Image: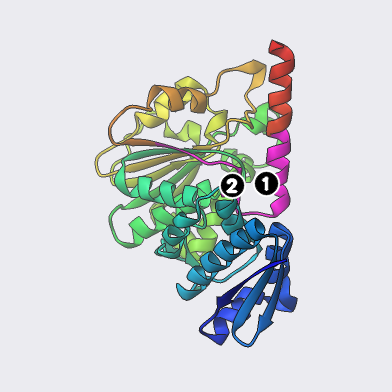
Amino acid sequence: MFEQTVSLERMEQIISLFGSFDENIKLIEKSFQVTISLRGSDLKISGEPDKVSLAVKAIDGLVLLITHGEPINEQNIRYVNSLVLDGDETNIKQLADNEGICITSKGKTVKPKTLGQKKYIEAIGQNTIVVGYGPAGTGKTYLAVAKAVTAFRAKEVNRIILTRPAVEAGEKLGFLPGDLQQKVDPYLRPLYDALFDMLGAENFQKYQERGNIEVAPLAYMRGRTLDDSFIILDEAQNTTPEQMKMFLTRLGFNSKMIVTGDVTQIDLPDGRRSGLVDVINVLKNIEDIAIVKFTEKDVVRHKLVQDIIKAYEKNEEAKKHKNYG
C-alpha cells in the first residue's frame, strides 16, 4: 500500500475540501479508488501508487480553487477529476483565475465553471459574432445573457434582444389562447428566466417597458437593422438556413450577436436542414466570428445529464457503424 501526504495550511481549506458529512472527500476516494484520512492538518492518501498520484493532483487542484475563493461542490470536483484523468491538471489554474462576468439580482457572481465555458466567454469578448453549440446544460444561453447584461449595465449597448424560433409550437400555435405574444411566450420562457435571474423581475419589467429589453420570436426580426444591441439567438438548431441568414444580416453598428443551440436536438419538420449546422460550416473561417463547441464535460447540471449525453452519443455512433458496416 502506497501513501502520500498533502499538507493543508488553513482550517477553511480542510472544511471546504471535506464538505458536509465528508461528501467531497468520499467523492474523490470513489473516483480514484483511494483512502483519504486527516491527521492534524495533513491529508494521508493511500492506495495504488498511480491512483494516489492522480488523487493528489486532484486535491492540489481543488485547494487552488479554494484559495481563489471558489466554493467546492460535486460539479467542480467531478470536473477537476476529469481534467486530472485526462492529464490536463495544469489547466485547473485557468479556472482558478476566472473573473466574474456578472452579479445576479441576488448578489451571486456568475463565472465560467469549465474550460469550455471560459473559452466561450473569451470568444464573446473578442468577437462580434459567436456561435456556441453543444449539449444541454453547458450554460450556453445563461452565460450569453450574463455577458449581455454586463454590456448593458456598462452602457456598451442600448438594448438586449433575445430571440428564438417557435418551431416546437408547429400548427398548434393557433389553438393556444391569447394574442401572438402570449402564444409564443411559453417558448421564450427560458430566456425570461435567465433575465429575471440577472436583473430581478422589477428591473426586467422596467427595461422591457422602456424598450431596452426585447424578448421575441425570430419572425419579429425580419426587416430590421439592430444597432447598439446585444442580440442572442437561442435554440438556433431549429432555424432553417434561410432564417439563419436573415437573422445574421440584421447585425448593425456597435452590436454583438450570439447564436446558441444543440445540433442533436433538431425539431424541424420533414428532415429540413438546420441553419445552425449550416452556419458552423459556412462561417468557420471568417475573421471576427468565433465558433465554440461544448462537450459533455462542460455540462454543469446533475451528473446524470453528462451520463445521458454520453449514452446517446454512444448509441448514435453504434447506429452509424451499423449503417456503414
Seen from this angle, which residue lies furthest front?
Answer: 1
Local crowd size for mark 1, using a 10 Å CA cut-off: few (<14), some (14–19), many (≥20): many
Q: Is 137 situated left or right of 228 in this image?
A: right
Res. 306 mark = 1
Give the answer, above or below, for where 124 lies relative to 81: above
Q: Is 156 situated left or right of 111 in this image?
A: left
* Residue identified by numbered label 2: 297
* Residue type beneath disc 2: Lys
Determine the secondary structure under disc 1: helix
Determine the secondary structure under disc 2: helix
Give the answer, above or below, for where 156 lies relative to 27: above
**Is 311 one of the magenta-colored residues?**
yes
**Residue 257 % position (x, y):** 38, 40
Front residue of 24/146: it is 24
In this view of the protein, can residue 32 be seen by the observer?
Answer: yes
Q: Residue at x 37, y 50 (%)?
A: 122
Do residues under tags 2 and 1 come within 8 Å of each other at their CB atoms?
yes
Q: Residue at x 48, y 53 (%)?
A: 143
Q: Is 317 situated left or right of 163 in this image?
A: right
Res. 110 mark = none
In this view of the protein, can residue 105 be seen by the observer?
Answer: no
Front residue of 209/188: it is 188
**Residue 225 % position (x, y):** 31, 35
Task: Identify the magenta region.
Answer: 291-312
Give the answer, above or below, for where 95 lies relative to 129: below
Give the answer, above or below, for where 66 lies relative to 89: below
Q: Residue at x 61, y 57 (%)?
A: 81
